[in-house]
Image (spheres, rainbow, N blue to C red):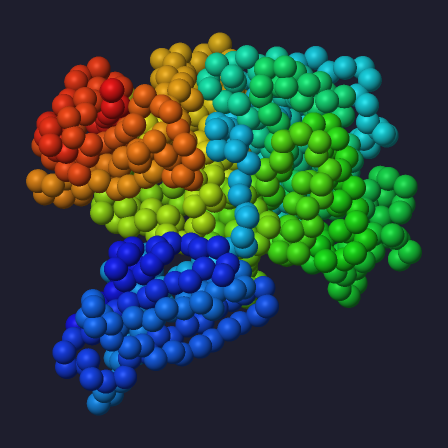
Amino acid sequence: MMFHDSRNIEFRDPIGAIPENTEVILSVNIPDELSDGRIFLCLQGDTVNGYVSAEKQMFKNNETGKFSISLNIFKVPGVYFYHFKAEKNGVKFYGNNKDSFGGVGSEYDFSPIPYQITVYKKDLAVPKWFLDSIIYQIFPDRFNKGIIPKDNGCTRNKPERPYFIYGSWKDLPMYITDKDNNVIRWDFFGGNLPGVEEKIDYIKNVGANIIYLNPIFESTSNHRYDTGDYMNVDSLLGGNNSLKSLVDAGKMKHVRIILDGAFSHTGEDSIYFDKYNRYDKNGAYNNTDSPYKKWYNFKECNEYECWWGVKSMPNVNETEPSYIKYNQEVIKHWMSFGISGWRLDVADELPDMFIKKLRETADNFTTGDQPVIIGEVWEDASNKISYGERRMYFTEKELHSVTNYTFRDCILNFLSYKESSKNISRRFLSLYENNPKHNFYALVNMTGTHDVIRLMTYMLSITKKDKKQAIDLMKIYSAVLFTFPGVPMIYYGDETCLEGEKDPDNRRTYPWGNENQEMIEFFSDLTKLRRDNAVLRTGFWRILENEDSFNDDIFMYERYFVNGFDAFWQSVDEKTKSIICIINRKLNEKEIIISGLISNTKYYDFVTGERIICSDGIINFKTRNQFMILISEE
């Protein structure tokens, strides 16, 4: 049988994503019955210059016995795909496995699934400060009430709209809708930016040094993804002066602010569209001479394209020059306030050119550290196709990171017995192989977001409402979150086991005065562990298997340094050379045998303090807890 392993340097050198103009050697083992036939490498690519295709004959390497080919054709950034073809009395193919996870592949009679090679533009990197970060996401209306200043610093007053503010902070969110399920009155709880500023010390004590705010610009709704005016912070949140005060207060305490930009659509009730004539009658809906008319796609009878059929969010033509120019002014305006970056809503609906322009504007305008650009992407961003086009998020100068929902799915599927440890390992290794290293280490791994069921609620569903077991699972999830490659993000309230089903229930108010202090302290301990150990931020990463017998209930990996260097081959001088994370989804003892470790290293368990000695590169012990974090000692 033919054989190729994309994660074995004997078959692919170098392994993983590569910078442009890198030579790659690909090899395949051919069985004797095919070895005197013709062997081809078949290559396709989606690049910034368009689609490419090639078929090259391979020849036997007498030293290795493999059929090999050296390729020096990856001169243009993009996503390339390859498989092998053997011709002798017919045709046989060898490609990726049926899950497209990389590594060992499969033989095919036709239509092989290809392997991926990501080729990225040289000199791309992620801001160093971001790799050292922990994010705290806040839905501003639901976090904390503060005193709004009399002078909000906005350039004009917000028009009155139908909404109501709850009298009780403890009420549950709700929608008031008409018969067609359109929201006719929005509910607000009164959380605002001065309230966030009041709680900076709390956020910092939890361990975060970035606050990511869901949209704060003037809008009709409480979620504010239907932007009414990109140049003004909503007066209900305290206005422009409250944002400036929050940014300045954050700088004093080394906490950065990242804003959420919803640029693929605006609100229907906005200065740009102005469907209800609340503004200056200059909006695109009612004025044929509107300067914003070209921003939108109108149909007959004043119908218009909107985001996923939601009439309150008309889509924008992001390639319209006047919109791009306006967007650049928006980016400059808020960068001047001292923010540290952007999270781009529905990034897969923003053209590559638009994202490039946005990043270029942010980079050129900042006077401090390079800002970070994060995209909302729910899949593997390295090979994302949107509207029929391969996206260049990481191959060109676009995004630094994306929201890594794959991480959340993998760990939750494992804990709920939907996937084995072997399967989630394959999925993680696929991400590692497909993404440029600097992007992989910057992926935003979250407890949750405003778009998914709350972590505690999910754990309660697994345990059939057993709260103690649900909290135990929360601890397992958190142990992985803060030791895994990537930048951890805490969705406000998850650190105190706040519950919530899907929107709007997952946007409950923070339960001040009724917190789970034990869980908050646990999160604080984990964030301190990450902050104190550089190996958890930029150390190498590898999956570990139990040498005794690989058990589907145990997931293990190691973060480590190699001869004083981290994964970016930067010199490090750290006492902790290795940290091993072990999670056991069952409450029973398991014998663990791990080999290939640094000999004669002493480890202690972060949870229990138990000492374990690695002798001759092997540790052999029984796990008595659902998770262990073993930290090496000098």
**Image mark count:** 0
Q: Position of residue 423 (x, y in %)?
A: 26, 49
Using the image as rendered, state which of residue 347 and residue 518 is in the foreground.
347
| Front-lying residue, 397 or 451 | 397
351, above or below 487, in the image: below
179 to the left or right of 59: right
Whole-percent x, y for residue 272 in the image: 81, 46
591 vs 64, left or right, is: left
Q: Identify the residue at horizontal 25%, vertical 60% (top origin).
A: 10
* Residue in view at x 23 percent, y 43 percent: 421
Residue occupying image coordinates x 44% and y 77%: 54
Residue at point 28%, 77% (across, down): 59
In this image, 439 relative to 590: left or right?
Answer: right
Q: Tell whether 589 sits left or right of 274.
A: left
- Residue found at the far top of this picture: 513
Quarter in which the C terminus is drawn: top left
Instruction: Mark yes or no: residue 108 visible.
Output: no
Q: Does residue 201 appear in this view?
A: yes
Above-or-below relation of 588 to 32: above
The answer to which of 315 and 571 lies nearer the viewer is: 571
Residue 238 in the image: state x and y as whole percent.
Answer: 73, 21
Q: Residue 246 lies in what quarter of the image?
A: top right
Q: Position of residue 632 (x, y in %)?
A: 25, 23
State the quadrant of the N terminus: bottom left
Q: 118 or 73, which lies in front?
A: 73
